[in-house]
Image (tube, rainbow, N blue to C red):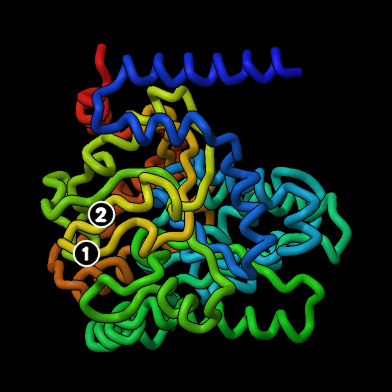
Amino acid sequence: MKQSLSLVLFFMVLDYCCYAQDVKPEIKQYVTFVAQQNTSAKDYILNLFKKYDIVILCERQHTETTQYNLIYDVINTEYFQKNVGAIFTEVGSYSNRQNTFNFTKTRFANDSIKQLEQAVIYRNGFFPPLWNNTNFYDFTGRINTLNASLKENRQINLLTCGTKNPSAEEQATPEAMKKYVKDNFKARDSLMASYIIHDFDSMQLVSKRKKALVIMNYRHAFSKNLFAGDANVGTFIFGKYPGKVANVFINHLALTNEVDQRDKDKPKMFQGMQMTPVQDGKWDAAFKAANKENLGFDFKNSPFGNDNFDLWPAETEYTYQDIFTGFIYYLPLEKQENAAGVKNFLNGANFEEIVRGWNLFNKAAGKNEERKYTPEFEKAMIQETSTFRVWKYQDLKKYRQIIDQWLNK
């Protein structure tokens, strides 16, 4: 027994020495910590539900697909189906919630019928229109398949909480559209939080399953308000249920203060910022050095938790453990993928009305560029929105250089 223990300790020291030789001093503490962790991302999320009633996941950028493989692995467990069951999402309009919910519960005669129905529901689930990111579309389809295999009391309840779609009256005039944008986008977080809180409280009265998974993108998942205006969804939920909420950052990239030049001509509210690896690449380098790519742990009592919160581009005194409960590292940047394209996305759609609504919204959002309907434009959009394509991060080579600076090669 003593001999076995000695061998284990020997190999642990050997591993540490190997890591120490391969990295610069600034990241040695991160590498050592990561090398000692052994809880997978999936198990970490499930373990949080044993301590908390609500777990908020901070989604990567909306086009990224591999994160939804992880989320599906979480919900495709007996524990989640027995004890949680509810998923609230930022993606998908609250207006279209019932249709999406019904879809996930429907048993279809065949996959062709299912796909056509799924495409229509997905197309109508967003405004501005033409949101054809593949990940959430695939996710709803997988939930439908999963639910068909489960008893009713174990099925997954998918509840979309995104901005309401405008009514016909709100799309009737430019003035009405401006009012719609003002009413629904300036208070977007408080509205989304109100939908979640209302339904979560109702669950406590009528359901045996009293826990929920919440999926929010970027700042919407923060526990503290760093935005000049409406607070974050996470801030509202943490305030409403003190001690009962955890939130988790899924490894991604940090925003800078520079507008991505590829987005400079978009309306301000849709301009993306340039991105860079978190903590100047130190975190990603540590996981690479430790040869780990699927872990979860609390920020508290880790070297990661004490780092300044650079995910937010403005200066702040907060650290990562001030904003998030935990951290998931699920696949390095080069293994993450973005995807767009939904088969039959515009099948049966009134594209002239889509273009009209699109133009009204852009004008209300401060961009006066107008798209003109033509049969050729419709044909091109049908092709573009229905063609499946996958891509890596455009600046991946630059990110890799930033990360590799911490590794002694």
**Circle 2 residue:** 308
Residue at the location (21% across, 64% down)? 317
Q: Is the residue 215 above or below the residue 289 in the image?
A: below
Q: Nearer the viewer, residue 317 or 25?
A: 25
Q: Is residue 392 left or right of residue 15?
A: left
Query: Can the viewer see residue 342 in this picture?
Result: no
The three-letter amino acid code for the residue at tag 1 is: Glu
Instruction: Please determine whether, in this image, residue 229 is positioned above or below residue 147.
Output: below
Nearer to me, 296 or 22: 22
Q: Earlier in the sequence, mark 1 or mark 2?
A: 2
Q: Residues within 10 Å of mark 2 (few under 14, many from 20)?
A: some
Q: Is residue 348 visible?
A: yes
Query: Which quadrant is the C terminus positioned in?
Result: top left
Q: Residues within 10 Å of mark 1 (few under 14, many from 20)?
A: few
Q: Are marks 1 and 2 in contact (CB under 8 Å)?
A: yes
Circle 1 residue:
317
User: Which amino acid type is shown beneath numbered disc 2?
Assistant: Asn
Dot label at residue 95: none
Task: Please tell me whether residue 398 is drawn above or below residue 78 in the rendered image.
Answer: above
Instruction: Determine whether the residue tagged by mark 1 lies in a helix, strand or loop.
Output: loop
Question: Where does residue 251 sit, x and y in percent of width and height?
Answer: 41, 44
- Rendered image quadrant of residue 140: bottom right
Residue positioned 59% across, 85% down in the render? 198
Which percent across, then down, holds residue 152? Answer: 85, 64
User: How far apart, in angstroms, are the residues tagged by discs 1 and 2?
Assistant: 7 Å
